[in-house]
Structure formats: structure tokens, C-alpha cells
């Protein structure tokens, strides 16, 4: 399955939140600061959109304290993302 890019404006309109982090290496390579853009679905499942690829992935973790990723899934496109958020 090939993921399609999802625009930033669509991600923000769907309620994703931004968390600015400082990564000097990322900023030197890309020319802009690294921002984590994510949306929590449940206590242990969240979605994350990457600004460099404009693609979205989902993650299930064991718990917030440890944060070990149990599995990861790819969001195909904007239509798929909207279905996940219903």
C-alpha cells in the first residue's frame, strides 16, 4: 500500500496538535524546526503526521509512562484518516 500525502491544513482542521521541539540537526538539514504533530485517539493509541513526508501513521503503546510501541499502522490517505477519527 502506498501512502498519499496529506496537507497540513487538513491535519490541523481535524484537530491535530503541534508540539515544538528543538533538534538542531533536523533544523540544519531542513531549514525549519522539528514539530511533532499528533492526535490522541485513546489512552494508548495516537496518530502522528510528519511534516517532512506529509504522511500520517498510527501507533499503539503499552502505556504513557513507558511509551513502548506495540504496533504501528499507516494511514493511506485523507479519506482513511477521516474514517479513523469517526
Image: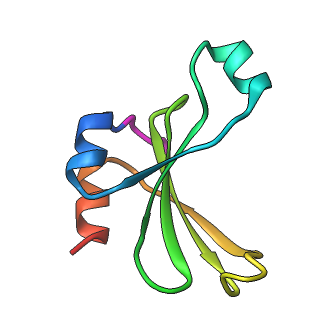
**Side (left or right) of 69 relative to 40:** right
Please, is residue 74 above or below residue 28 in the view?
below
Magenta stretch secondary structure, dominant: loop
Q: Is residue 10 above or below residue 41?
A: above
Q: What residue is drawn where x is 47% and y is 41%?
A: 55
Residue located 50% across and 70% down the image: 46
Residue 5 screen position, x and y as percent:
39, 34
* Residue that appears at 72% across and 25% down: 26
Q: Find residue 42 and report its horizontal and vertical position in percent.
A: 44, 84
Q: Position of residue 75 (x, y in %)?
A: 43, 55
Name the image quarter holding the C terminus.
bottom left
At 24% from the left and 67% from the top, the residue drawn is 83
Task: Tell me residue 45's x, y (percent).
Answer: 52, 77
Position of 56 with respect to 35 (left or right) is left
Compared across the picture, whether 74 is left or right of 65 comes to left
Q: Is residue 4 above or below residue 44?
A: above
In magenta segment, residue 59 = no
Q: How many marks?
A: 0
Which image quarter: residue 44?
bottom right
Locate residue 67: give its quadrant.
bottom right
Query: From which residue to which does the magenta span run?
Result: 1-5
Amino acid at each position: 500500500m502506498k501512502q498519499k500525502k496529506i496537507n497540513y491544513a487538513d491535519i490541523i482542521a481535524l484537530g491535530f496538535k503541534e508540539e515544538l521541539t528543538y533538534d538542531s540537526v533536523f533544523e540544519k538539514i531542513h531549514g525549519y524546526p522539528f514539530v511533532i504533530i499528533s492526535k490522541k485517539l485513546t489512552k494508548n493509541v495516537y496518530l502522528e503526521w510528519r511534516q517532512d513526508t506529509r504522511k500520517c501513521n498510527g501507533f499503539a503503546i503499552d502505556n504513557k509512562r513507558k511509551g513502548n510501541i506495540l504496533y504501528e499502522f499507516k494511514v493511506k490517505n485523507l479519506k482513511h484518516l477521516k474514517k479513523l477519527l469517526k
